[in-house]
């Protein structure tokens, strides 16, 4: 009898109670009929998964995504044929009210709960984008960074895969509101800033704020915030502060997070910059 090292991990996200991450490795057992209270975005990493809904059975291979709306009664299991073993997958569970709020942000009006067809094997996300989302949500990145990544992923799903048609609300230039948000970030970048705070500052939905901010300034609010913090840290290093002091005094709470973004923006690591500028 073949033994499998099955592992099922649930990750609740700090400062993001709207979502839970699931990582499942080498799952071979069958899950009997059940329902979830959340939307479930499931990406198959390895093997093949069979899902039975009502009297229909669907299969999803590695690299394909299945989206289950809340309340969908289903059973699932690994497909083992021709010596094929168990399957591995990752899943993103999203609170229904949170996803509906995002849908209403996009359309600018009340709408019915978003629906996705679980019979479709979605390939539009791609494993790379799901990898990036999972990696970011599990790191010690900022709340703004994580919420932006989660929302962008869900915006894409709502606009391209929801069977409930969601038409983006038309918006005007909103120039003053965008400048107000940029100035708010420029002044308060050392503090903890959330996407909700920026949206309230602009009197815009989070969806439209992100879209319009990028269009006007060429950067997302998160990217502009990170840039402000990096250039502040750069100046502090040049003035004699240690790397840890410069990071903390510029709004970063984690050294690895600071180092990763410093190299991305400046082009070299903080350590190398320190050696070359002292």
Image (cartoon, rainbow, N blue to C red):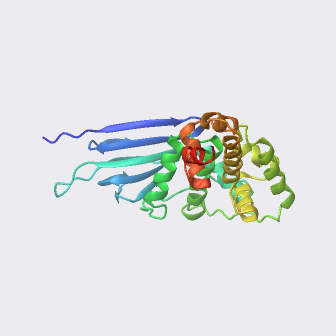
Q: Residue 114's quadrant in the figure?
A: bottom right
- Horizontal relation, residue 31 to residue 277: left or right: left
* Residue under the image location 48 percent in, 47 percent down: 134
Do we see residue 6 in this rendering? yes
Identify the residue shown where x is 63% and y is 43%: 278
Residue 111 in view in this figure: no
> Where is residue 158 shown, x and y percent of the image?
59, 58
Q: Nearer the viewer, residue 66 or 182?
A: 182
Horizontal side of residue 232 vs 269, given as left or right: right
Measuring 48% from the left and 59% from the top, which residue is drawn there? Answer: 117
Q: Is residue 57 left or right of residue 198?
A: left
Q: Where residue 171 appears, x then y in whole percent? A: 79, 64
Q: Number of numbered discs present? A: 0
Quadrant where the image shows the N terminus? top left
The structure residue drawn at horizontal position 59% and vertical position 44%, both measured from the top left corner, is 274
Give how far across and how far down residue 51 sits, in percent: 35, 52
Left or right for 78, reference 149: left
Q: Residue furthest right?
A: 176
Instruction: State the residue lying farthest toward the left.
Output: 1
Residue sitting nearer the eye, 21 or 248: 248
The vertical placement of 274 against 59, above or below, is above
Residue placed farthest to the front in the image?
278
């Amino acid at each position: 009898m073949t033994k499998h090292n099955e592992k099922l991990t649930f990750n609740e996200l700090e400062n993001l109670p709207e979502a839970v991450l699931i990582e499942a490795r080498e799952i071979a057992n069958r899950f009997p009929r059940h329902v979830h209270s959340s939307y479930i975005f499931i990406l198959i990493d390895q093997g093949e998964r069979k899902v039975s809904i009502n009297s229909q059975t669907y299969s999803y291979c590695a690299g394909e995504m299945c989206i289950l709306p809340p309340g969908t009664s289903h059973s699932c299991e690994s497909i083992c044929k021709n010596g094929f073993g168990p399957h591995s997958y990752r899943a993103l569970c999203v609170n229904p009210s949170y996803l509906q709020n995002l849908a209403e942000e996009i359309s600018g009006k009340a709408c019915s709960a978003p629906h996705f067809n679980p019979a479709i094997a979605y390939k539009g996300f791609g494993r790379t984008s799901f990898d990036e989302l999972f990696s970011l949500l599990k790191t010690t990145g900022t709340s703004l960074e994580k919420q932006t990544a989660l929302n962008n992923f869900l915006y894409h799903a709502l606009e391209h895969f929801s069977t409930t048609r969601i038409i983006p609300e038309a918006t005007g230039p909103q120039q003053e509101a965008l400048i107000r948000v940029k100035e708010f970030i420029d002044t308060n970048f050392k503090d903890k800033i959330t996407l909700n705070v920026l949206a309230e500052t602009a009197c815009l939905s989070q969806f439209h704020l992100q879209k319009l901010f990028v269009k006007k300034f060429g950067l997302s609010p998160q990217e502009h915030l990170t840039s402000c913090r990096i250039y502040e840290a750069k100046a502090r290093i040049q003035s004699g502060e240690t790397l840890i002091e410069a990071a903390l005094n510029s709004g970063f709470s984690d050294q690895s997070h600071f180092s990763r973004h410093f190299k991305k923006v400046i082009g070299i690591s903080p350590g190398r910059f320190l050696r070359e500028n002292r």
